[in-house]
């Protein structure tokens, strides 16, 4: 004895097939997105454009100086840039980067654009508020006269807030002049 369904057996099979097909598509979409990582980014930029005398900390030691070109036509972008000069000492300009919205396990990287004629070794240093050096790099600029990107590798934030990002130059007898612009610090998690 067979049971008959309203609308016939083929209609039931079509309906079950459509439900099964929708379930397979839903499962595939869920599986396809379940393993995708979604990274986040926090970025702070400063190009010396808004009152650099109060935003940037400047320090020198020995025969050195540092300052700002405001509207001088020497900036990489915008109107202003910073500069460092040393003949027998060191000079730096630094910026406090807030990281309070960044998870403690984030990795960060910093960049300055720097310009020199004649070549120079420059530094980017990352410090915490307790004067602990977190990261440093000291590359050589080729002296092309063009602004060059100087980057750090990624460094671990370890929950530090804020961080002090500085560009530094030193010299012992030969003059070194560096222009700085467009500092960027990015943290990734």
Image: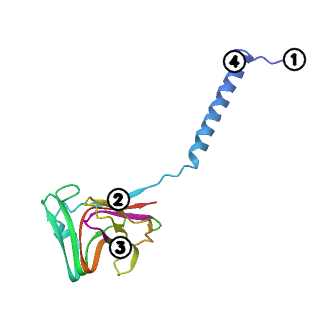
Query: Spatial distance from mark 1 to mark 2, Cα to Cα?
Result: 74 Å
Image position, residue 80 (x, y; %)? 17, 61
Residue to which mark 4 is pinned: 11
Q: Earlier in the sequence, mark 2 or mark 3?
A: 2
Judged from this view, the residue extending furthest toward the top is 7
Please indicate, yes or no, whether residue 165 appears anywhere in the rendered image. no
Q: Is residue 135 left or right of residue 71?
A: right
3D distance between C-alphas at marks 4 and 2: 58 Å
Q: Marks 4/3: CA distance?
A: 72 Å
Q: Residues within 10 Å of mark 3 (few under 14, many from 20)?
A: many
Residue that numbered label 3 is attached to: 125
User: Which circle, 1 or 2, is nearer the viewer?
Assistant: 2
Residue at point 12% right, 60% down?
Answer: 72
Comes first in the chain, label 1 or label 2: 1
Q: Nearer the viewer, residue 177 or 27?
A: 177
Work out how far the residue at label 1 is from the one at label 3, CA to CA, in angstroms: 87 Å
Identity of the residue furthest to the right in this view: 1
Q: Residues within 10 Å of mark 4 (few under 14, many from 20)?
A: few
* Residue 50 % position (x, y): 18, 61
Q: Earlier in the sequence, mark 4 or mark 1?
A: 1
Q: Which residue is mark 2?
A: 43
Comparing labels 4 and 1, the label whose residue is closer to the camera = 4
Q: Which residues are magenta?
A: 107-120
The kind of secondary structure element at disc 3 is: strand
First along the sequence among labels 4 and 3 = 4
Q: Position of residue 155 (x, y in %)?
A: 44, 68
Q: Which label was assigned to residue 1? A: 1
SS type, badge 2: strand
């Amino acid at each position: 004895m067979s049971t008959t369904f309203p609308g016939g057996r083929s209609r039931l099979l079509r309906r079950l097939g459509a439900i099964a097909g929708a379930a397979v598509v839903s499962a595939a979409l869920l599986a396809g997105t379940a393993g995708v990582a979604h990274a986040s980014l926090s970025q702070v930029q400063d190009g010396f454009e808004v009152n650099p005398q109060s935003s940037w900390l400047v320090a020198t030691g020995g025969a050195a100086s540092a300052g700002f070109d405001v509207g001088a036509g020497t900036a990489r972008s915008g109107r202003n840039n910073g500069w460092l000069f040393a003949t027998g000492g060191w000079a730096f300009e630094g910026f406090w980067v807030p990281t309070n919205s960044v998870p403690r396990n984030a990795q960060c990287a910093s960049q300055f654009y720097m310009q020199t004629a004649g070549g120079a070794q420059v530094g980017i240093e990352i410090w915490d508020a307790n004067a602990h050096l977190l990261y440093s790099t000291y590359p050589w600029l080729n002296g092309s006269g063009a602004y060059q990107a100087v980057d750090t590798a990624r460094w671990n934030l370890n929950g530090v807030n804020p961080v002090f990002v500085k560009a530094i130059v030193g010299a012992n007898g030969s003059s070194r002049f560096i222009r700085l612009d467009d500092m960027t610090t990015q943290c990734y998690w």
